Amino acid sequence: MSITSALQTGVSGLQANSSKVENISSNIANANTVGYRRTFSEFVTQNTNSTQAGVLSTTRADVSSNGSLVSTGRSTDLAVQGDGFFVVSRNVNDPVESNYYLTRAGSFTPDQNGNLRNAAGYFLSGFPTDAAGATGAVSSTGFGDLSTVNIASYQIPGAPSTEIGVSGNMPAQETGLATPGAPFVSSMRYVNQLGGSEKLNLSWQPSATPNQWTVNVADDAGTNYGSATVNFNDSGATAGSPASYVSNGLPMDPATGTVNLTINNGAAPQQISISLGAPGSFDGMTQFAGDQTPAAFTDDGTETGSLVRAEMSDTGVLYGVFDNGQRRALFEIPVANVTNPDQMRSVNGNAYIATLESGSVTLNKAMSNGVGSVSSGVLEGSNVDIAQELTDLIQTQRAYSSNAKIITTSDEMLDETLRIKR
């Protein structure tokens, strides 16, 4: 190797170690960046013909190694525990597939329109679900069926009440008095055909006849649906249960104790069945001595609901919790994966694009096909080990100094050669 070749070898060493310092600097700078993956340099011998004449530096990324999870308590902060990536897009419901990236940075927050966007400005993508929580047929090899995850514009329609159950206890000692006391009144909520809440009032008037009551049903608008006489058993195995019902204009089935109301609150009336309890049973109203037990009601109707908050399951299903007490699936967040994550190409914003070397992207349900689960309220930190980076920095600095010494030594030798001529 000539002196000139030694100079060139030293220069290649400076360049290679400069590249390594660049990667170390990037790792240290991003040590606290959510979901960051460290990069590192690998040196390759550079030959001239059959002679080793220098070194080349190649940069690689340690994408497949995961960082530690840090709890944040924010429900929209997400992390993949295990293999896989979130799918994000540059724009809301982006129609261009090349604008979809993979990332581990799950620091999502709703924007002004309720779309979940991370700190890099990328929007989280998922498969929308129907009312039953199903996504339907979706592609697992492309991004065309994905939509931007939105947690603001959801409202679920109400379901009108059709069946209401009533249970409670009337005090037996209030009946059979010469002058019966005031009626016991309770309000019963039901859901109308537009998903709104309405009330019916049940009035239980004790009778001068022992173990006998008159129940009346009316609404707040003044509509009286009629009354019925209810006799309770006073002895035997069925003591305290209804014995019989006699309608005084209240539409009901005496054999079952069911009141069948027709409420004119629309073009088509609403039909509601109210179960007071079958004769001889204890699953509805009863009459025992002691205090009154206020009536409790079970209603199959649900009011129209607005989204209150979102919850994420381990399987990547984003649920909406509504102010009417309902909970339903809104999106299924797929976990994407490639065969060789370390060969993906990085883009701005801590995201990646699949390459020929990495293999194509597949979209999976969380916790299936080898991908991890989705956790809410946590973020994944970087996979940078500061102690290791500082150690590498010291070693690289010394290697750089040694290559610089090769250049200065070669320069001195050339200078000596030039002096021979003089």
Image (cartoon, grey):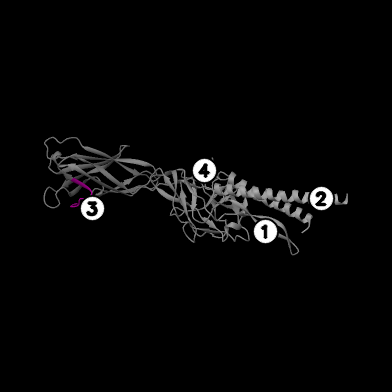
Sequence-first tag of 1 and 2: 1
Is any atom of residue 405 visible in this view?
A: yes
Q: Which residue is mark 2?
A: 416
Q: Amino acid at mark 4?
A: Thr
Marks 1, 2: nearer the viewer: 2
The reply, left or right, for residue 367 in relation to residue 360 is left
- Residue sitting at x 25%, y 42%: 295
- 123 inside magenta stretch: no
Could you tell me how far apart the alpha carbons at marks 1 and 2 are, in whole angstroms? Answer: 32 Å
Cα separation, mark 4 vs mark 3, equals 54 Å
The image's mark for residue 109 is 4
Query: Which badge, 4 or 3, comes first in the chain's sequence?
Result: 4
Nearer the camera: disc 4 or disc 2: 2
Q: Is residue 190 left or right of residue 347?
A: left
* In-image side of 356 versus 150 (left or right): right
**Main secondary structure along the magenta-highlighted residues:** loop
